[in-house]
Amino acid sequence: MFPTHTVVWELALLIAFGLGLLHGITPDEHTWPITFSYSIGSYSSKGGRKAGFRFSLTFILQRAIGSEIAYYAINAILVDVRQGFGLYSAIGIVMIGSALYMKRKIAKGSYSSIEKHSRAVTVMPMIHGFIAGWGIGAFAIILYGVLSPSMPNGYVAWVPGALFGFGTMVTQMLIGSIFGAFIERIHLSERNKAIFAIKVSSTTLLASGLAFTIVGIIGSIFPAWLSNLGISTAIDIPNLSKIDVGFFLAVPVVFISAGLAMYFGLKDLKKTPGEIPQRHVSTHP
């Protein structure tokens, strides 16, 4: 049985929200690759906030459900290492599907109202949020093993999970806004921003999706070996205490693929600045 500990329930609620804030801002493989990719694809600060909100909305639902389950049976919500890597593969497949959808949009020349009409930008972050939420890390263990059991009864056992999700939403919307504003501030026409943003977003999603899927497959076959890979740091904060597979997926894969996509995307736009007809583009909502 997984050992549980409890604290005063009022304190548990404050800790849940605070941990959520910290979870959203630290480089977590279940949040950053997704929020970054869709925020870039929205190519505005407002769109980035929306991407962070949509992802976190279903993440809140998942954590509330997980918190309720953990109150009654902590072992039912925790997964073993092999299952955790299986979740990587599921996340990766959804990323790849979303990236291919975006690239299909590019091939067709359909760049208008991307934030408003593209399912990849509006719906997929919510699907990702619910799936990724089932990942078990240090934050989830504290939530399910300490905070949820601290609730006075099962009727409110979902609250720590929901507050954790709301905390994550706050910082994910902030991060999404920053990522989206980055593209917004690039000196390009509205139509070229749309083209550039979708190319970067789809490339980042595709690279992350392939990395997640490959790591998931390898981890499912050799879970102990892959779990033990990593270098400890002096930072005693979850997601920063160790440079491991999760950190690799959250930082290098995301930013290297995005950086390369930005470099070649701008290069292509300079070569053919007027290639995309104006009628394909409308003002970003």
Image (cartoon, rainbow, N blue to C red):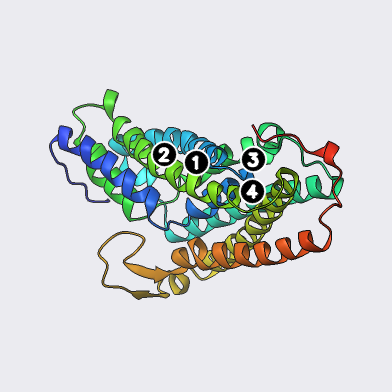
Determine which residue is flagged by label 1.
Answer: 52
Residue 61 percent coordinates (x, y): 44, 32
Q: Is residue 107 left or right of residue 59?
A: right
Between the C-alphas of marks 3 and 2, the distance is 17 Å
Q: Is residue 242 left or right of residue 184?
A: left
- Asked if the residues shown at circle 2 and circle 1 are in contact, with their CB atoms under 8 angstroms apart, the answer is yes
Q: Nearer the viewer, residue 1 or 241?
A: 241
Between the C-alphas of marks 1 and 4, the distance is 17 Å
Q: Can you say whether 227 is above or below 88 in the image?
A: below
The amino acid marked with disc number 2 is Met
> Which residue shows up at 76% across the image and 37% down it?
112
Helix, strand, or loop for circle 3?
helix
Helix, strand, or loop for circle 1?
helix
Determine which residue is flagged by label 3.
Answer: 121
* Mark with earlier residue (3, 2): 3
Q: Is residue 107 left or right of residue 73?
A: right
Q: Within 10 Å of the Cα at label 3, are there few (<14), some (14-19), or many (20+) other Cα atoms? A: many
Helix, strand, or loop for circle 2?
helix
> Which residue shows up at 71% across the image and 61% down it?
266
The amino acid marked with disc number 1 is Gly
Q: Nearer the viewer, mark 1 or mark 4?
A: 1
* Mark with earlier residue (3, 4): 4
Determine which residue is flagged by label 2.
Answer: 169
> Which residue shows up at 81% across the image and 41% down it?
110
